[in-house]
Amino acid sequence: MVASRNVLVVSLGLALGVGCSNQPPASDPSSASGATPPPTQPAVTPPPPVDTATPPATPPSADAQTEATTSTTPSAPPEAPLTDEQIVAVLDAANKKEIDEATLAQTKAKNKDVKAYARMIAQHHTQAKTKQAQLAKKLGITAAESDKSKQLTDETQQAVEQLKALQGADFDQQFVATMIQDHQKTLDLLDRRILQDAKNAELKAMIEKDLRPTIEKHLKDAEALAQKLGLAGTAGAGTTSATGAGNQGSAGAQGAAAAQSGNQAGQTGVTAGSPGGQGGVQPPAATPGAATMK
């Protein structure tokens, strides 16, 4: 009996020991439920939203705006070619301008070289005007007014009125400067337009072989006379030959022509110290020579 009780006690003790050893620890609740916890994931920061809108256009610079404005500005239309009838009217107006100015100089000029030059100008241009009228009649060409001939007529009136307001050396200097400008402009007009536009061969030959060489000689003589009078801007005067188009003119012609242009604003004097004479020709540096022009 006692032995059986002891065996029972031992058996119970063993059973209790085994049961206690198989229980999970109380501190681990996951072991009690039998589930394995998922691994901890690191926090992920979402990327910033991408702005898909088109960025605003950069405003053009001032230079770009100026260039665009310039490129879109229409250029002046080219001048229409002159007809033979219009060319005859232009030549008449150009001859009349020289005749009117030279006729005035023959009575108002003080320097005898200037008087002699004015006499030559009046004579040559009167002859040229008569010869051109005879040729136009022979060819059956009737003069027709154009913007260019009207412009020359207006310039003649302005130049004559300006010269009338001057006296003595002021007149002499301004007259010579006007002659330089007139003949240079006529040469340019012949080369750049008239000789290119003329259709009649006989009219074109008269202009090229007769009129143009005469105009060029008048320009050279005026430049030489300007040097005698001491006009500023006439040093190194000289013109191109009378053979072709594109006549560039001389430094002396450009200087004196600029002086004459400066006086066209209505000045009443051409010397450096006279009222309204800014931009005009300079007073003579020395007493002009007494030789008469050939």
Image (cartoon, rainbow, N blue to C red):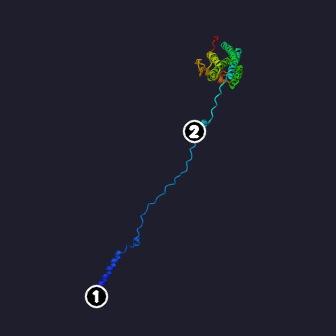
Q: Which residue is drawn at 29% across and 84% down?
A: 7
Q: Residue at x 35, y 76 (%)?
A: 20
Could you say where residue 291 lies in the image, as x and y percent from the top left?
Answer: 63, 11
Mark 2: which amino acid? Ala
Q: Which mark is residue 64?
A: 2
> For mark 1, what is the residue?
2
Q: Return the residue nearer the eye: 122 or 270.
A: 122
Label 2 packing within 10 angstroms: few (<14), some (14-19), many (20+): few
Q: Return the residue nearer the eye: 95 or 160.
A: 95
Q: Which of marks 1 and 2 is in front?
A: 2
Q: How far apart are marks 1 and 2 (CA)?
A: 121 Å
Mark 1: which amino acid? Val
Tag 1 secondary structure: helix
Label 1 packing within 10 angstroms: few (<14), some (14-19), many (20+): few
Could you say where residue 221 lies in the image, as x and y percent from the top left?
Answer: 62, 15
Q: Splitting the image into 4 quarters, where does residue 164 fall?
A: top right
Q: In this view, does 264 lie to the left or right of 47?
A: right
Q: Splitting the image into 4 quarters, where does residue 128 fall?
A: top right
As drawn, the residue found furthest toward the left would be 3
The quadrant in which the C terminus is found is top right
Q: Which mark is residue 174?
A: none
Could you say where residue 10 lies in the image, as x and y percent from the top left?
Answer: 30, 82
Residue 30 vertical placement versus 108 (above, below):
below
Tag 2 secondary structure: helix
